[in-house]
Amino acid sequence: MNVEIDHYKVLGLPSGEEGSKLTEKEISKAYKFKALELHPDKRPDDPNAQENFQKLKSSYEILKDEKARKLFDDLLRVKREQEARRSQQDSKRRKMVSDLEDRERAAFAPDPAAKARAEEERIVRKLKEEIERIKAMHSSKGGQTAAASESKRKEREASAKGGGVDLDKGKMLKVSWEKVGVGYTAERLREIFSRFGEVEDIVIKGSKKKCSALVVMATQEAAVAATRIVLGDLSNPLLVLPVQAAQAKDFPPPTQQAAEFDGITNLVGAGYKAYEDSVFEKLQKAAARNQN
């Protein structure tokens, strides 16, 4: 992480004394606005999109950390003072100041420039330590999350190998979309389906014409809720079907739309594909009407 970066400017905020007076709320608002602008999904043709987005997140982490931000503000202040001192000194004044500093050093007076350099080095060292602390903290959180996800995956694999005793198909959804137009990553699908509840796992598969994914929700209620509305971008909507229809005793009486879904698990082979194509065609027509 480069200590020469002006983290206020990365977030599109004023720097210097004005930046040091900004509130946490103002900084958070600027980050959210900038994150929408620089998100890799918004810049599919930019090879540096991921790198720029990570720089934005790093700058935000420093500015929202009280101790790291104070050190960064101090570093900017010292640099401003040095720049102001340099800009005010023309060649004649620099010579006069140099002579004065020589006399002060001769009289065992401290050198202001050396003192400023020492203070800058101290602040830079402290800021680097805080940056490493923040990186270590987030690395630890990411490791714990990855370990938990891996543990759940192994549990599901072990359950499947043991005869599928704990494999609850009522929580599983088959999601399909066209290969043209707006695409969907695992991260994007997790963001969409998290509106209905916790998402345990997502596995994406692709073919020549269509893409599909298996989404595992934490509860059957969340899986049922996700099948009752149109999801995704209207130019390429998602077709969401339950792997196994919900049992009537577990949920309220189904609507006409839910009743249609109850018969899906009886479709296999060409019949299932024909049904899927029919639903896709209806979704695309609805999307075209909304755009007009």
Image: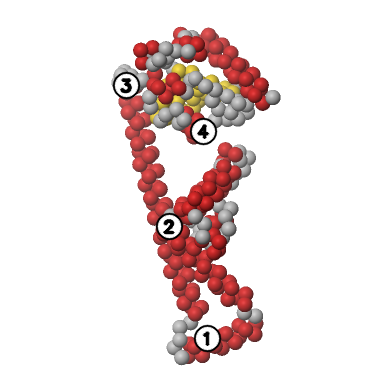
Front label number (2 vs 4): 2
Give the amino acid type for the residue marked by disc 3 in the picture: Asp
What's the distance in space between the residues labelled 3 and 4, CA to CA? 27 Å
Label number found at residue 101? 1
What's the distance in space between the residues labelled 1 and 2, CA to CA? 37 Å
Q: Position of residue 235 (x, y in %)?
A: 62, 26
Quadrant in the picture for the C terminus: top right
Q: Is 116 positioned to the left or the right of 210 in the image? A: left
What's the distance in space between the residues labelled 3 and 1, CA to CA? 79 Å
Q: Position of residue 206 (x, y in %)?
A: 53, 25
**Mark 2 — residue?**
66
Q: Is 291 positioned to the left or the right of 231 in the image? A: right
**Mark 3 — residue?**
166
Relative to 242, residue 7 above or below: below
Give the amino acid type for the residue marked by disc 4 in the picture: Arg
**Mark 4 — residue?**
188
- Local SS, label 4: helix
Q: Position of residue 27 (x, y in %)?
A: 51, 52
Give the amino acid type for the residue marked by disc 1 in the picture: Glu
**Mark 3 in CB contact with mark 4 (< 8 angstroms):** no
